[in-house]
C-alpha cells in the first residue's frame, strides 16, 4: 500500500479508532458470568459506529487454506485485503507452523495490519490448540489429557496450563481451544485420549484447574494468560457406536448428572471465557442449532456471558451431515439464532451470508450487535486494545524453557500408573542388573498423542533407559513387532490415510529377534500399545480413528507371551490413547505400567519409575474392560446392572481409580462429624492414612458416596472427593472432605435438584482394594 493511500485510511479512520480505544477503556475486567458487573454503555456506541461488514468480519473467522494466511509468510495486499479489509474477529493457526520467534513476528504483522490498514483498527483474537501443550512448532509437549488425568492432581494441571498459556501468549496466540470436558464413556472413540476420563467429578476438577491455569484466577486475563474454551458442548463423549460425531441421545437426567457437570463447573467456578458447541445431536437437534442447549441452559440457567463458538465446519454440517438446514445460508441462520457467536471454519464458512440475511430481515441486527459486543469484550479482557503486540525474543526464551521441561518431567512421572507388580519385581535394582533387553514397537519412538505439532524434543523409552543405566549395564534393543506397517509418530495423527497392521508373516522374524535379544538378559522391558495413527480424531470418512475393538493391534500380545516364555522377568510399558483389552498380555507379564502418552519426557519418566527413582502414584481415570463386549464399562453404573455374562463375569480388567505403589498405605476408620445433617447441612469426613512401607510414595485418597434409598435410582457409587498426598515411610496424615449439597444432591422425579433424607454410604479408599466405610444420615 502506498504511503498516500495509507495516510488516507488513517485520516478517515482517526476518529473511529479513538472511539474504539475510549469505548473499551472502561472494560477493565473480564467476567464471563457477569459477577463483575453489567455491560459498559460505551460498548453500545462502539458497536453502533461499525459498518455491518465490519461486524460480520468479527464473527466470521479468517482461517484455512482458502485465506492463504496460514502458515503466514508475507502479508501482501493481494492475499490480505480480501480477508482482512473489514477487520477480523479471530484468525486461526497464525503461529502453529513457525518457530517461536518467527511466530511472534507473524502475529505482530497480522495485528499491525489490522490496526493500521483497516478502518476499525480492532485487533484479532489469534486462536490455537493447547490440549496438552501449545500445538505449535517447538512448544513443550506435556502428557496427553488422559495421562494428566491419571495424576489425579489438579494443582499440577493448573501449573501445566499456566505454562501452556505463557508459551502461547508469548508468541502472539491469545485464545486456546481447550480443555476438552467430554466425559469419556466409550473407549472405542478415538478422542478418548483428549479427555480427563469417565467420571464427571474428576473431569470437573481437572477441567476447572486447567481453565485457571489458562486464564489465571482474575480479575481479568493477564498478559501471560489466554482465553480458554470448554469443549465439546454437549454429550460428546459417548457417541453412538463409539464413532466421532455420533448422536448423544440421553435422557435429561443423564445429561444433567453425568455429561453437563464439567461444563457447569467451568462456567460457574472457573468463569471460562468460551464454550464450543459439539458436532453431535441430542434428541434429534444438532448442538450447533440447539437454542435450548446454548441459550436456555448455558446462558439463561447457568449465567454464561462469554463467547459461544462453532467447532470446525460445525455450522456447515447442519446441512451436509445432519440435514436440518436446506443450504449454507439456512445453516448460518439456524446456528447464529441458536446462540453461536463465532464460526470456526476451514473451507466451508457460512457466516459470511449473515450480512445479506440482516438486510433481508432473516437475522436481526440486534443479534449481530450482541455477538460483536461479546467478542470485543473478550479482546479487551485480554488487553489487546492496549497492546496487541508481543516480544519475539521473549517468545523464544519461554518456549520449552528449562522450567517447562522440568514440569513436563514431573507431570509425566505423576501420570504413570502401576497396574501389576508380581513378586515385587519393580522397582528394578540397577546394582543387580547386567543386561536389559528393551523391546517393542514403541520402545525407540516418542509418541505424544494427538493435537501435537513438531515438539522441540522427545526422549524415547529406549533412550531414557540407556541414559539411566549409563555404563552400569548393557542395553539390547529389538523392535519385536509393529503396530502398523509404517513406523508412525505425531505426524500420523494429521495424515488421512491410516497405516494398517502389518501382515502377520512379516512379524515372525521380528518376534524371533526380540526373543533372542531377551535370552540371557536380566530383565525385558517391552513397550507396546498404540500410536497416533490408530487412536485419533476421526474427522471424516477419509480420516478415521475410532475402532470396533480394544485389542492390541498386530502381534503385540504374542510378542509379550513369547518373551515371557523365556523365563526372563518381563515388564510391559503401555503407551496408548485409550483403555486396551489386553488380559492375555497382563497375565503373561510380571509387571505392567500404563503411561498413556507421556509427552516429550516419556523415556526419562519411565526410566525413573522402572529403577525406583520415582514411586508411581497415578490412578486410572477410566475403566479398562476385558473386552469390547463389556461396554459400556464405566464404574458408576446403576444397581440393576448386577449380573454376569454367560461364561464371563462383569468385573473389568482394571477398575476406575486403580493404581499400585512400591510402598503400602494403611487407611484408618473414617470419622463423620456430625453423623446426621439436615438437607441443607454439611458434614466433615476425616480419615487418617499411614505409609506402612519403606519408601516415600504418593497415595490418592478417594471418597465415594451412595444413597441407599432414593426417589430415583442412584449409581452404585459416585466419586465426590479425592486428594493426592505424599507420605514418607511411617508418616501419618489426616485428610478431610466436606459433604453437602454439592456432593449429595441429585435430581428427583420432578427433575428438581436437592438432597433427600436417608442414609448415605461413604466409601473411602485408594481404588486399589483398600476401603473403609461409614454412614451419613440426611434428615428432613
Image (cartoon, rainbow, N blue to C red):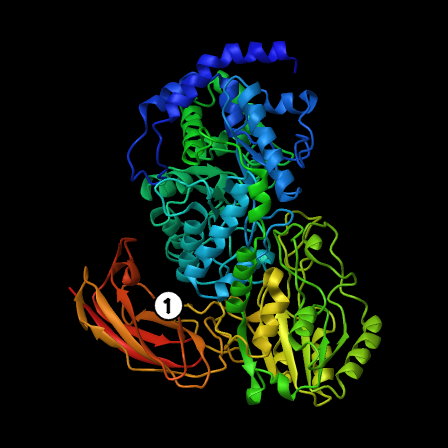
Residue in the picture at 49% in, 18% down: 52
Q: Quadrant location of the C terminus?
A: bottom left
Secondary structure under badge 1?
A: strand
Closest to the observer, 513 or 223:
223
Closest to the observer, 416 or 312:
416
Closest to the observer, 97 or 627:
97
Residue 300 x/y as whole percent: 33, 39
Residue 85 x/y as whole percent: 59, 20
Quarter where residue 639 is shown: bottom left
Residue 131 x/y as whole percent: 54, 52
Residue 241 can be seen, yes or no = no
Position of 458 relative to 696 (above/below): above
Residue 2 x/y as whole percent: 65, 13
Circle 1 is placed at which residue position? 722
Q: Quadrant location of the N terminus?
A: top right
Residue in the picture at 56% in, 26% down: 112
- Relative to residue 389, is residue 4 drawn left or right? right
Quarter where residue 635 is shown: bottom left
Characterize the local packing of mark 1: few (<14), some (14-19) or many (20 or more) Cα atoms within 10 angstroms.
many
Amino acid at each position: 500500500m502506498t504511503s498516500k493511500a495509507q495516510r488516507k485510511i488513517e485520516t478517515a479512520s482517526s476518529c473511529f479508532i479513538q472511539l474504539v480505544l475510549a469505548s473499551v477503556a472502561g472494560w477493565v475486567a473480564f467476567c464471563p458470568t457477569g459477577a463483575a458487573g453489567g455491560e459498559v454503555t460505551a460498548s453500545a456506541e462502539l458497536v453502533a459506529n461499525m459498518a455491518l461488514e465490519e461486524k460480520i468480519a468479527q464473527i466470521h473467522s479468517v482461517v484455512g487454506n482458502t485465506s492463504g494466511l496460514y502458515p503466514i509468510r508475507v502479508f501482501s495486499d493481494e492475499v490480505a485485503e480480501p480477508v482482512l479489509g473489514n477487520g477480523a474477529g479471530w484468525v486461526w493457526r497464525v503461529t502453529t507452523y513457525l518457530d517461536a520467534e518467527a511466530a511472534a513476528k507473524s502475529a505482530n504483522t497480522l495485528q499491525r495490519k489490522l490496526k493500521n490498514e483497516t478502518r476499525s483498527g480492532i485487533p484479532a483474537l489469534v486462536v490455537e490448540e493447547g490440549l496438552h501443550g501449545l500445538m505449535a512448532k517447538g512448544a513443550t509437549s506435556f502428557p496427553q489429557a488422559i495421562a494428566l488425568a491419571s495424576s489425579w492432581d489438579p494443582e499440577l494441571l493448573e501449573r501445566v496450563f499456566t505454562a501452556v498459556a505463557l508459551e502461547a501468549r508469548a508468541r502472539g496466540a491469545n485464545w486456546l481451544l481447550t480443555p476438552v470436558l467430554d466425559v469419556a464413556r466409550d473407549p472405542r472413540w478415538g478422542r478418548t485420549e483428549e479427555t480427563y476420563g469417565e467420571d464427571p467429578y474428576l473431569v470437573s476438577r481437572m477441567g476447572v484447574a486447567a481453565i485457571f491455569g489458562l486464564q489465571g484466577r482474575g480479575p481479568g486475563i493477564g498478559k501471560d494468560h489466554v482465553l480458554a474454551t470448554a469443549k465439546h458442548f454437549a454429550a460428546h463423549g459417548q457417541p453412538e457406536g463409539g464413532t466421532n460425531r455420533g448422536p448423544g441421545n440421553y435422557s435429561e437426567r443423564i445429561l444433567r448428572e453425568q455429561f453437563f457437570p464439567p461444563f457447569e463447573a467451568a462456567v460457574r467456578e472457573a468463569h471460562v471465557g468460551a464454550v464450543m458447541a459439539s458436532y453431535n445431536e441430542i434428541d434429534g437437534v444438532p448442538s450447533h442449532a440447539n437454542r435450548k442447549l446454548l441459550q436456555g441452559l448455558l446462558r439463561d440457567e447457568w449465567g454464561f456471558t462469554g463467547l459461544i463458538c462453532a467447532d470446525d465446519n460445525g455450522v456447515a454440517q447442519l446441512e451436509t451431515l445432519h440435514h436440518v438446514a436446506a443450504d449454507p445460508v439456512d445453516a448460518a441462520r439456524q446456528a447464529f439464532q441458536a446462540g453461536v457467536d463465532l464460526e470456526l471454519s476451514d473451507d466451508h464458512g457460512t457466516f459470511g451470508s449473515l450480512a445479506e440475511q440482516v438486510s433481508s430481515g432473516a437475522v436481526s441486527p440486534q443479534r449481530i450487535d450482541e455477538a460483536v459486543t461479546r467478542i470485543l469484550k473478550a479482546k479487551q479482557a485480554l488487553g489487546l486494545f492496549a497492546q496487541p503486540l508481543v516480544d519475539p525474543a521473549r517468545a523464544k526464551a519461554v518456549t520449552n524453557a528449562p522450567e517447562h521441561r522440568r514440569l513436563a518431567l514431573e507431570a509425566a512421572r505423576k501420570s504413570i500408573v502401576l497396574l501389576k507388580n508380581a513378586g515385587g519385581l519393580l522397582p528394578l535394582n540397577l546394582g543387580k542388573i547386567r543386561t536389559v533387553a528393551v523391546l517393542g514397537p514403541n520402545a525407540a519412538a516418542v509418541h505424544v498423542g494427538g493435537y501435537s505439532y513438531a515438539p522441540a524434543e522427545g526422549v524415547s523409552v529406549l533412550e531414557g533407559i540407556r541414559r539411566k543405566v549409563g555404563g552400569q549395564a548393557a542395553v539390547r534393543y529389538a523392535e519385536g513387532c509393529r503396530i502398523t506397517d509404517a513406523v508412525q509418530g505425531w505426524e500420523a495423527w494429521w495424515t488421512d490415510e491410516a497405516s494398517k497392521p502389518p501382515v502377520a508373516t512379516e512379524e515372525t522374524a521380528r518376534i524371533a529377534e526380540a526373543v533372542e535379544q531377551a535370552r540371557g538378559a536380566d530383565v525385558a522391558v517391552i513397550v507396546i500399545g498404540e500410536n497416533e495413527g490408530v487412536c485419533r480424531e476421526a474427522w471424516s470418512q477419509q480420516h478415521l480413528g475410532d475402532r470396533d475393538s480394544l485389542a492390541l493391534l498386530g502381534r503385540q500380545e504374542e510378542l509379550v507371551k513369547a518373551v515371557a516364555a523365556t523365563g526372563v522377568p518381563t515388564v510391559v510399558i503401555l503407551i496408548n490413547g485409550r483403555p486396551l483389552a489386553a488380559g492375555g498380555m497382563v497375565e503373561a507379564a510380571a509387571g505392567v505400567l500404563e503411561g498413556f502418552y507421556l509427552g516429550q519426557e516419556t523415556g526419562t519418566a519411565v526410566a525413573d519409575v522402572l529403577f525406583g527413582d520415582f514411586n508411581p502414584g497415578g490412578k486410572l481415570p477410566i475403566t479398562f474392560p476385558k473386552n469390547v463386549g463389556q461396554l459400556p464399562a464405566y464404574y458408576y453404573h446403576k444397581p440393576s446392572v448386577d449380573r454376569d455374562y454367560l461364561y464371563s463375569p462383569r468385573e473389568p480388567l482394571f477398575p476406575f481409580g486403580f493404581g499400585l505403589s512400591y510402598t503400602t498405605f494403611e487407611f484408618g476408620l473414617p470419622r463423620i462429624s456430625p453423623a446426621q445433617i439436615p438437607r441443607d447441612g454439611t458434614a466433615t469426613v476425616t480419615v487418617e492414612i499411614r505409609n506402612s512401607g519403606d519408601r516415600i510414595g504418593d497415595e490418592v485418597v478417594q471418597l465415594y458416596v451412595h444413597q441407599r434409598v432414593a426417589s430415583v435410582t442412584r449409581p452404585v457409587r459416585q466419586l465426590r472427593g479425592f486428594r493426592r498426598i505424599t507420605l514418607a515411610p511411617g508418616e501419618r496424615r489426616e485428610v478431610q472432605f466436606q459433604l453437602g449439597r454439592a456432593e449429595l444432591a441429585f435430581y428427583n422425579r420432578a427433575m428438581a435438584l436437592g438432597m433427600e433424607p436417608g442414609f448415605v454410604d461413604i466409601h473411602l479408599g485408594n481404588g486399589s482394594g483398600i476401603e473403609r466405610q461409614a454412614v451419613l444420615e440426611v434428615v428432613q
